[in-house]
Amino acid sequence: MPRTFAIGDIHGCLSLLKTLLAHIQPTQDDTLIFLGDMVDRGEDSKGVLDCVMMLEKQCHVIVIKGNHEEMMLGSMSDTETAKFWLRYGGAEAMQSFGLQPSLEQIKHIPFKYKCWLESLRNYYETVDFIFCHATPKADISMDTQGDEGLRWRKLRKADGRHISGKTIICGHSEQRNGQVKQQEGIICIDTFAYGCGVLTALEVETLTAWQAQSDGRCLKTLLNLF
C-alpha cells in the first residue's frame, strides 16, 4: 500500500536523513513531502539537496520552500538578503559547497540549485491535510497567506484549527525536546535536528512518527489526531 511521509526540518543534517530513509525504505509508490528548511546550520546542506534530488527519481517527492530556502535563493540576487543568510546558517551551507562564506562566493553556487529552489512549492494540500513550512494564520485561506504565514510564522499556543477544517502538518517551530508538538488541528514535526539530533518523518496514513536519532536508531510513536 502506498505511504505518505512528511519530513520535518533537516537543516543540513545529512546523516540523520540517511538514517531516516534507511528505516523508512521508501518505494516508488510512496510519497515524500519535505516541509522545508533542508539547508543551513548542519554539516552538509549540499548533500541534503543532492539526496532529495536523487529521491525525485525514485519515488513521488513534493518539496515545500522553507524560510531558509527563501533566504538562500534570495541571497543569489540581493546583497542584504545574502548578509542575513550568512549570519543565520548560510555560512555552513556555503562550506558544504566547498565555498568560503562570503558575499563574493555566493555566485559560485551551481546554477542547477538556483533553478531547483525556484521550483519549490509554497504548500501542498490533500483532502484532510495541509502541508506547510510555517504555521499559517487560521482565519486566512492558504492561497492568500503570504510569506509570513507560509514560511516565517511560528506556532503559538492560541493557534487552532484552520478555517479549511483540515489538519496542518508543519515545521519551522523547533521543538527543543525533540518531540512532535500537537495542538488542535496542528502537528509540528520540526524536532530540532541540528540541535538535539532528532529528525522526524510523519507517516500520514497511520499518524506514526518515525524519529531518526544521532546514534543510528529510529524510534516509532503512534500519534492521536485531535
Image: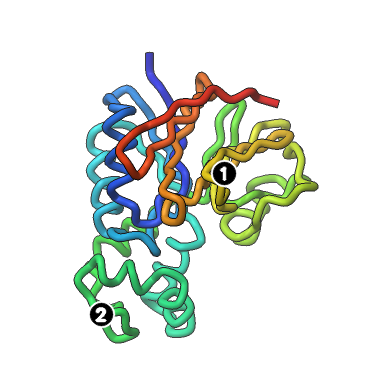
Secondary structure at badge 2 equals loop
Q: Amino acid at mark 1?
A: Cys
Measured from the top left, where is residue 201 in percent x and y?
44, 35
Which of the 4 image quadrants contains residue 182? top right
Measured from the top left, where is residue 219 in percent x and y?
42, 29
> In the visual, does 124 lie left or right of 153?
left
Q: Nearer the viewer, residue 95 or 75?
A: 95
Q: Nearer the viewer, residue 11 or 103?
A: 11
Say if 7 sits above or below 173 in the image: above
Q: Quadrant of the N terminus?
A: top left
The disc placed on residue 170 is: 1
> In the visual, does 31 lie left or right of 169?
left
Q: Quadrant of the C terminus?
A: top right
Asked which colour scheme the image uses, the reply is rainbow
Look at 37% across and 32% down and name the residue there: 218
Mark earlier in primary sequence (1, 2): 2
What residue would you read off at disc 2? 100
Crowd tier of the residue under label 2, counting other residues whose Cα lies within 10 Å: few below 14, some 14–19, many 20 or above: some
Q: Amino acid at mark 2?
A: Gln
Secondary structure at badge 1 equals strand
Measured from the top left, where is residue 18 in percent x and y?
27, 41
Say if 22 sits above or below 102 in the image: above
| Residue ranking furthest to the left | 98
| Residue ranking furthest to the front | 215
Instruction: Report how far apart the C-alphas of labels 1 and 2 lie in the structure.
Output: 32 Å
Look at 55% across and 30% down and name the residue there: 126
Say if 5 sits above or below 40 in the image: above
Measured from the top left, where is residue 38 in percent x and y?
39, 53
Q: Nearer the viewer, residue 83 or 139?
A: 83
